Image (tube, rainbow, N blue to C red):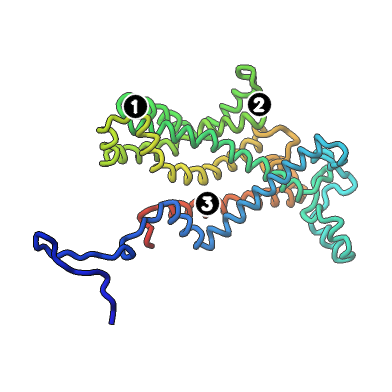
Amino acid sequence: MNQPIGKIGANANGYVVQNDPPEQMVGAGRSLWGDAWRRLWRDRSAKICLAVILLYALMGLSTAAYDLLAENVKALNWPTFQEMVDFDHRDQSPGMYWSNIWKDPSRLIADWRQMLGTDWSGRPILLKTIWGAKVSMTVGLMANIIAIPLGLFLGAVAGYYGRWVDNIVVWLYSTLASIPSILLLISLKYAFRTPIMGLDLSGIHGVYLALGVISWISTCRYIRAETLKLRELDYVMAARATGRSSLSIIRCHILPNVFHIAIINFSLGFIGAVSAEVILSYLGLGVAVGTPSWGQMINSARMDLFAGRWWELTSAVTAIFFLVLALNIFGDRLRDALDPKLKNV
């Protein structure tokens, strides 16, 4: 026989009441972030894509550490990437490497750098592809570090204050959005060719700034729209009635409830930044010539196709494909995990 969950009796006024024992009381609810993490961790595709993204990040960190040690610790006698020139093995295809391995399997480890072929100067395509991950991951990270806080701040301020503040912000992002992003990006990079206030922005730092300037628009739109709804809710109006300042309300009540939108836009903005860096490098407006990047690889390999040298272009495009695919799928899964409407799905 089942045990009763509580005792039923009458109070002093004669009303029937049920006294539940303490262990039957409702416990504290789980947070949005806790639920999101659980849903994300149960998704196999999200875990696979996160592993791919972390692998690219690890390649970027390892090459950055290698460059730092090779340039500053001369006792190691490590060659920099620019010094990895071997004209005796120039323009070798991957097929030549694997045919040599078939003849002599002992060379599998010794010549592993050449498994994807070499370029016109004998540099291994595999190492160029790995070094290119450093540029792309750094550009994606730095561009979003500029764009996301800017869009988060402007969107929250415009949505909460409204009136002339909202009009200025809407006019600003509407004007920038009316210009094709690639043309605006190219124009900014041309403007950064000359020093601005003593700062040299002609290289990779100009790419960070240019991408950050044009990438905040979508974040600002979403944050503004969500803030317009949040400012009319009861808890925000109650905070306003108690005399709290507008900045305090934005910091304590608005931003925590729109932060998940910023995280989603960070993952999606990463894709746009990586793609834009490739386009700029292809046009000669990206990183400095000689710096290994996927855009530089595509630019240098476009004429090689006429000579039948396809491996450099294929390696760069394949690396871009898997990174963008992983970021796309992970961004979709992250958006679903942070959606409260899908909490019980």
Q: Which amino acid does label 1 sit on?
A: Asn
| Quadrant of the rendered image containing residue 144 | top right
Q: Could you tell whether 292 is left or right of 57 in the image?
A: right
User: Which quadrant: the C terminus?
Assistant: bottom left
Give residue 68's mark: none
Looking at the image, tell me whether mark 1 or mark 2 is earlier in sequence order.
1
Circle 3/circle 2 CB separation < 8 Å: no
Q: Which amino acid does label 3 sit on?
A: Asn
Judge by depth and name the residue closer to the eye, 237 or 27: 27
Looking at the image, tell me whether mark 3 or mark 2 is earlier in sequence order.
2
Mark 1 residue crowding within 10 angstroms, few (<14) / some (14–19) / many (20+): few
Q: What residue type is labelled 2?
A: Ser
Residue visible at 28% across and 82% down? 1
- SS for tag 1? helix
Task: Give the CA separation, mark 1 to mark 2.
Answer: 34 Å
Circle 3/circle 1 CB separation < 8 Å: no
Would you place residue 36 above or below residue 268 in this image? below
- Residue 312: x and y in percent read 73, 48
Residue visible at 26% across and 37% down? 238
Give residue 328's mark: 3
Q: Could you tell whether 159 is left or right of 238 in the image?
A: right
Give residue 202's mark: 2
Would you place residue 2 above or below residue 226 in this image? below
- SS for tag 3? helix
Looking at the image, tell me whether mark 3 or mark 1 is earlier in sequence order.
1
